[in-house]
Image: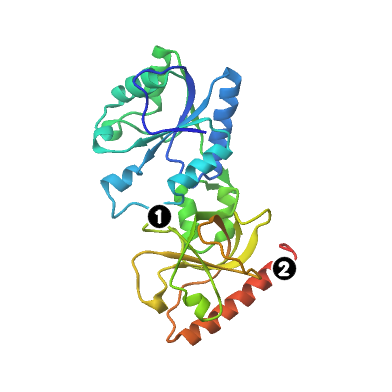
Amino acid sequence: MQVSRTVPDQAASPTVLAIGNFDGLHLGHCALLKRLTAKARQLGLPASVMTFEPHPRELFAPDQAPARLTSLREKLDLLADKGVDRAYVLHFSRKLAALTAEEFIEKALVRGLAVKHLIVGDDFRFGRGRIGDFGMLRKAGSEHDFGVEAMPTIDIAGERVSSSAVRETLAAGDLEHAARLLGRPYCISGRVVHGSKIGTRIGYPTANIQLKRKRVPLTGVFTVTVSGLGPQRLRGAASLGVRPTLGARLQPVLEVHLLDFNRRIYGEHVTVHFLHKLRDEEKFASLDMLSAQIARDVAATRDYFSGEQHG
């Protein structure tokens, strides 16, 4: 997949485009991308996506912005897996936000990308003051000869699939529910880096996964699998949070103890797939008490994977 940080001043060739933040790439996003790639193949044009970095709410209300479900790298990897040919990652700045809806249509859609067909969510708003809507896009499409399609909301058992719904289920610790909305277990990717080595000292060595985010949508102790270290996913128990026993931190830490595994993996890029929440974070009075609880967590993890549905 080709990734661009800007829209060209003048398109070299036309494209089929979808616009959105695509945080988490849940089943609603997947349905939209399926339409996008089908239309692109039908027209013989590249399937393109326009997304924004940072999320608009991170610019205007950083203290109230939701925790990201996916990093930019994770999002781009997921988009590529869905058959997207080009991704335009636009830096969301006050300058971009100041563009009128008409300027955005003219500069980005008509001149910059020569869009032949556009797909957006049914609640998509754009332009200064968010006055641009689907009706304005339809009008522009008839004037500039491009098709416009609104993707309706996807429901699962009467529940609207959205990034907000995924965040709520993750925060509540219902990993199985989140997986139903995403179409896969929730996951976090990162590089294995050196940590404090506390786990090794107490008999449970962990892989420290680098987190390039200040906030995470879930915390606690989980059963997980880890991909990226060979053909098979490895099983383990993971802790994600601020490690209260070792002193309060503002920056979250992701640590994974892999079952029956003894290999140096520093520098490897891995993906942690969250399957089930075991418990919330706790503060223990001593490392001995922490070690005893980790032993119980590892035993619970083995029990989880020995269940018939996972064996």
Residue 29 in view of the camera: no
User: Which residue lies at the image location 68% right of the left edge and 73% below the top edge?
Assistant: 303
Secondary structure under the numbered disc 1 in the rendered image: loop
Q: Position of residue 93 (x, y in %)?
A: 27, 38
Residue assigned mark 2: 307
Q: Nearer the viewer, residue 197 or 97?
A: 197
- The amino acid type of the residue labelled 2 equals Gly
Indicate the position of residue 245 as horizontal and vertical percent values. 41, 79
Instruction: Place residue 91 in its image quadrant.
Output: top left
Q: Quadrant of the C terminus?
A: bottom right
Q: Nearer the viewer, residue 147 or 301?
A: 301
Q: Please determine whether, in this image, residue 194 is positioned above or below residue 200.
A: above
Answer yes or no: is residue 11 visible: yes
Percent across and percent down for residue 229 are 61, 57
Q: Which is nearer the eye, 231 or 152?
A: 231
Q: Which residue position is annotated with label 1?
A: 212
Residue at 46% across / 49% down in the picture? 70
| Label 2 neighbour load within 10 Å: few <14, some 14-19, many 20+ | few
Q: CA distance from mark 1 to mark 2?
A: 34 Å
Question: Residue 107 — which label?
Answer: none
Residue 22 is left or right of residue 233, and the answer is left
* Mark 1 Cα-neighbour bin, 10 Å: few <14, some 14–19, many ≥20: few
